[in-house]
Amino acid sequence: QVRILALSFNNMTGALPPALGSLERLEDLDVEQNALSGSLPSALGDLARLRQLGLGGNAFSGPFPDALCPRLEALLASSRGTPPCDLSGTKFSCPLPCDAAATCGAVCG
C-alpha cells in the first residue's frame, strides 16, 4: 500500500525495477538526482493513481516507453501550473513518442 516513494539524492545506481509498476496505490514516485541508468520500465505506465513523477537528474537511456505516454498526459491534464513530472537530464532515443515526454523535460539525442 505504498503511496509515496521518495528516494531523491540517495546516490542510488542501477536500473528502475519493472516491479514498480505493480505498486497499485503509488501516487508519487520521486527518484530524482541519483545515478540511475538503463531504460525506463514500460510498467511505469501501469501506475493508474500516479500524480507526481520525478525521474530527473539520472542517466536513463534508450527509447522512451510508449506505455508511459498516457500516464504523463493524464498528469499534465490534471496539473495547475508547474508540470507534476520531471524527466530532465536524460537523453532518450529519438524520436520521443509523445509531446508529454518533452513537456516533462525529456529530450532525445
Image: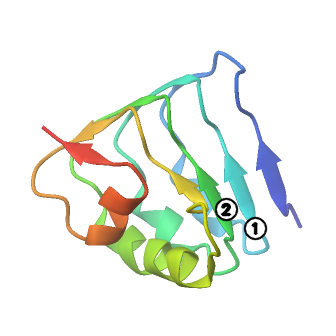
Is 22 left or right of 66, judged from the image as shown? right
In the depicted structure, whether residue 57 falls above or below residue 40: above
Provide the secondary structure element on which disc 2 rests.
strand
Count of marks placed on residues:
2
The residue where tag 1 is placed is: 27
The Cα–Cα distance between marks 2 and 1, rounded to whole angstroms, is: 6 Å
Q: Which residue is found at the position 40% from the left and 49% from the top?
A: 40
Tag 2: Cα neighbours inside 10 Å, few (<14), some, or many (≥20)? Answer: many
The tag on residue 51 is none
Q: Residue furthest right?
A: 1
Residue 73 horizontal/vertical position (percent): 44, 79
Dividing the picture into quadrants, the one containing residue 82 is: bottom right
Provide the secondary structure element on which disc 1 rests.
loop
Residue 70 horizontal/vertical position (percent): 41, 81
Residue 14 horizontal/vertical position (percent): 50, 25
Q: Which residue is found at the position 50% from the left and 38% from the top?
A: 56
Query: Three-letter amino acid code at disc 2?
Result: Gln
Q: Nearer the viewer, residue 23 or 95?
A: 95
Q: Nearer the viewer, residue 33 or 49?
A: 33
Residue 71 horizontal/vertical position (percent): 49, 76
Is 107 left or right of 94, judged from the image as shown? right
In the depicted structure, whether residue 58 falls above or below residue 46: above
Q: Nearer the viewer, residue 19 or 71?
A: 71
The residue where tag 2 is placed is: 52
Q: Quadrant of the N terminus?
A: bottom right
Q: Quadrant of the C terminus?
A: top left
Query: Three-letter amino acid code at disc 1?
Result: Glu
Q: From the image, state whether disc 2 or disc 1 is nearer to you.
A: 2
Dividing the picture into quadrants, the one containing residue 47 is: bottom right
Question: What colour scheme was applied to this rendering of the protein?
Answer: rainbow
Could you tell me if the residues under marks 2 and 1 are in contact, i.e. CB atoms within 8 Å? Answer: yes
Q: Earlier in the sequence, mark 2 or mark 1?
A: 1
